Amino acid sequence: MPSPAIREPAVTVRAFARRFSPAPRGARLARRLALHQLGRWHLPYGSETSDAVGLLVAEPAADAVTHGRVPGRDFEPTLAYAPGPRLRIDASDARGERRPAPVAAGALDEGGRGLLLVEALASRWAVPDRVPVGKTVRAELGLSPGAPRTRPDGW
């Protein structure tokens, strides 16, 4: 007698992806539209999740504009929201030779804290290569309440 089929629950993944010009205005617009999209997914503006996502979009976007800028090439933030709940934020640019890593900035330095914020806010994060060219700063929120905040190799 054949065994009954096991039905897996349907999984809905919501996604947001846009390309922006590599300019400060593009970075601001990326953050604003990402937060607007969260509201459409019923994650309200001003909530802890919204604030974290705002920083996780803004910091890599500012880095892409400042350090990853390639003339004629845009940067691209994406959000993926799946049940669990799990929210993944990617910020991709066209320059791949600079591999970012969190470093301690001096007290008077105007920059250098972006990836420290990513590391502090994300459940996990990594910097994979972007195909065909460039890099992506990837961060994930809300894996589980006790998820370690580490940067895994080869994510």
Image (spheres, rainbow, N blue to C red):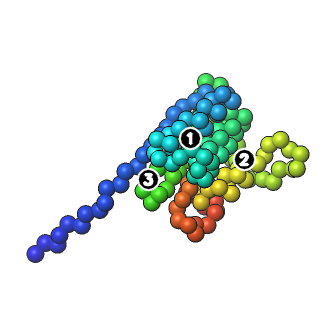
Where is 46 relative to 95, above or below? below
The structure residue drawn at horizontal position 52% and vertical position 51%, both measured from the top left corner, is 88
Give the numbered dot on residue 82: 3
Q: Where is residue 41? Give x, y as percent.
A: 46, 45
Label 1, residues with CA under 10 Å away: few <14, some 14-19, many ≥20: many
How far apart marks 3 and 2 lie (CA) works out to 25 Å
Q: Say which amino acid is labelled 2.
A: Gly
Q: Which residue is mark 2?
A: 114
In which quadrant is the N terminus drawn? bottom left
Give residue 83's quadrant in the image.
Answer: bottom left
| Kind of residue at disc 1 | Leu
Which residue shows up at 78% across the image and 46% down it?
112
Which numbered mark, 2 or 1, is in the foreground of this view? Answer: 1
- What residue is pinned by disc 1? 35
- Binning the other alpha carbons within 10 Å of mark 3 as few (below 14), some (14 to 19) or many (20 upward) gives some
Q: CA distance from mark 3 to mark 1?
A: 16 Å
Above-or-below relation of 15 to 116: above
User: Depth check: 131 or 38 in front?
Assistant: 38
Relative to 89, does residue 132 appear above or below in the rendering? above
Front-lying residue, 22 or 73: 22
Q: Along the line of sight, which residue is nearer the eye, 8 or 49? A: 49
Return the disc, 3 or 2, that comes first in the chain's sequence. Answer: 3
- Farthest residue to the right: give it: 108
